Image (cartoon, grey):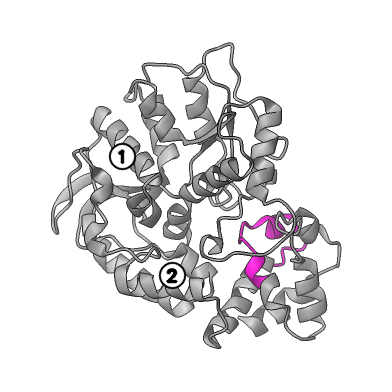
Amino acid sequence: MHQLLVKNELLGCIQCGRCTAGCPVSLRTALSPRKIIYQNLREQKKLPKSQDIWSCTTCRTCQQRCPKGVSVMDYIIGLRSYQVERGKIEPTVRDALESILKHGNPWGRAREKRTEWLGDEKVRILNEGEETDILLFVGCTPAYDPEVQKSARALAKILNRAEVDFAILGTAESCCGNEVKRLGEEGLFEMLVEENSKLFDKYKFNRMITISPHCYNTFKNEYGLNFEVLHYTQFLKELLDAGKLQIPQETAEKIVFHDPCFLGKQNDEYDAPRDILKTLLPEKNELLEFSRNRERSLCCEGGGGRMWLEVESDSPRNAEERVKDARTLGAEIIATSCPFCFLTLSDAVKTTKSEDKIKVMDICTIIAEGGF
């Protein structure tokens, strides 16, 4: 990968600096995609500092901005792979990867507890050979994090009320591997692709929907699956358009939507979440927008394995800037459709002492709590 990119792409760099100018992490760290590509790699100088390559959230802004199509993000992942092979990784990253290998999730939780998120909600667990129309891939964070579990239960409630024929894999479900690949552990990622692909072949279903945009991204773009994969907002939009989902109560609170990088920048889906939110608002209330939205959205810094890796900086975190921007807009709710965005923004609400001013909610939770 290193030699291939040097030969075919890196020499195309024209030093315009658009990658670094657009990088949301360069705002508060020493990360400079331009420096990595041109000074360190194209000129064949020494490898960049370890903290620089681990600061990257793999949001893909650099590749979107590059006029020459240089795969900056992919090269950074390649550099991480080199570090992983040498054992040069932080203990928290090592522990997350080992947990995925042993337990099928990065949170160090037992596989047997993967269905505890259900609570009292009735959801069918698919057995081998059984059929369902929709397979709901829950994902690791919605399955195990106590706050994100609320979003998973809310989605299950919505699907049940809409009489969708769906089921889950239960304790047989394992990590999708999206963050594994972006952390540079290519061998573990390939193993997950093989094992998950064989697992899916044991069941009969028509389409898969995911809660996390990270799961959606890797299943859609990196697995080579023979069935359609949708993010849950895309599926709920389908139900709304078909008249199969009725939302009985509007919310009077002012909402601003935060675009997840792995739904928007990675997969060009910006409209489905907004269309859903607009149905929740009375006519007098417009959906608020950040100045940095859609393809210019400010990354929350949760992707690229950064949930398990702290990057030191004296500057405010991006999520804290996001909360401040939301308060300036007069928003009462920051709506999300990504578990990582939910966690980073929720933490930022606390660190900015904004608990009495604003809250972070997943879209399906807003629907469920609105009298659904």
Tag 1 near tag 2, CB within 8 Å: no
Secondary element at tag 2: helix
Q: Residue 352: percent from the left, percent from the top?
A: 64, 41
Question: For residue 60, what is the image quadrant?
Answer: bottom right
Per the rendering, the mark at residue 153 is 1
Question: For residue 254, what is the image quadrant?
Answer: top right
Q: Nearer the viewer, residue 178 or 327?
A: 327
Q: Residues within 10 Å of mark 1 (few under 14, many from 20)?
A: many
Amino acid type shown at disc 2: Ala
The span from disc 1 to disc 2 (Cα, nearest Å) is: 25 Å
* Magenta segment boundaries in residue numbering: 53-71
Q: Which residue is mark 2?
A: 96
Q: Residues within 10 Å of mark 2 (few under 14, many from 20)?
A: many
Q: Is residue 312 located in the magenta-colored stretch of the structure?
A: no
Residue 134 makes an appearance in the image: no
Secondary element at tag 1: helix
Task: Answer with left or right where residue 209 lies relative to residue 37.
Answer: left
Q: Residue 211: percent from the left, percent from the top?
A: 40, 46
